[in-house]
Amino acid sequence: MKTLPLVIKMGGRLLQERAALDALLAVCRQLKQQRPVVLVHGGGDQVDQWLAKFGFTTEKIDGQRVSPPEQMPVITGALDGAVNAELVSRAMLQGLNPVGLNLSAGTSLQFTVNSKLGAVGLAKPNDATLITLLLAQGFTPVFSSVGIGSEGQLLNVNADLAAAAICQLVQGELVLLTDVPGILDSQMQLIAELTPAAAAELVATGVIKGGMKVKLDAALETGQALQRNIIVAGWQQPENLLKLMQNQPVGTCILY
């Protein structure tokens, strides 16, 4: 049976906590002994800090960042520059043989523009040639959440949605890491399994909203496209990822 690539989305406070990041990357090295690993990252906190330094304000709509074109050089510098380079450097120290990329490398993804949010791209799978070659040669692709539009314009892409598109591109398994243990109910308790119908009810009642709704949307779309369950889990216990290899429950399993 073909070994499916594992696509892991990283973001939140994890990217600013080096010890936790190193621990997670060490687990990724163990995972990589059994299957290919692809990393996709955001970096919202870092973007906020950079925009503030340049005198810009930050606005979000439904959990997604509004990215006016004039802010894109700063957003790109933070995500595709500083954060990607930091993650590549830490992954290199863990022996992951990383390659830093943006989402348009090798025309991996293609984009339409969500003009309501400014220079924000909606990603779709396009060409798996580059990523397939890298994985076959033992590299670990590390994708920032920056893309390039059809007219050459820089685009900010929600990292959860970017990871979903990359996962569909490589026909892999998707794990969306977050600052909480998984998707929580109204009592802030972990939901072990979530069906699309139950998810819709939690959204309708306002239990799931903002950034977590974006994460859920990415999971549901990918699960449906690949006919495969999707995991939303916390990064605080990276060793839990090893349980995936034994088909043990981790975080919230979103059923397709």
Image: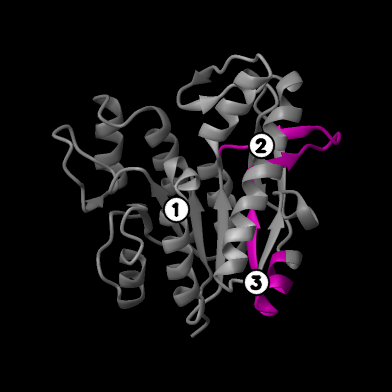
Query: CA–CA distance between discs 2 and 3?
Result: 22 Å
Which residue in the protein does label 3 denote? Answer: 97
Q: Amino acid at mark 2?
A: Ala
Residue 224's disc is: 1
Q: Residue at x 85, y 36 (%)?
A: 152
255 lies above or below 44: below
Res 117 seen here: no
Which residue in the protein does label 2 denote? Answer: 78
Foreground of the two, 202 or 71:
71
Check if residue 149 falls in the magenta segment: yes
Instruction: Looking at the image, tell me whether mark 1 or mark 3 is earlier in sequence order.
Output: 3
Disc 2 on helix, strand or loop? Answer: helix
Question: What segment carries the magenta color?
Answer: 131-158
Q: Residue at x 39, y 34 (%)?
A: 213
x and y percentages locating residue 34 in the rendered image: 47, 81
Query: CA–CA distance between discs 2 and 1?
Result: 32 Å
Q: Nearer the viewer, mark 2 or mark 1?
A: 2
Foreground of the two, 132 or 74:
74
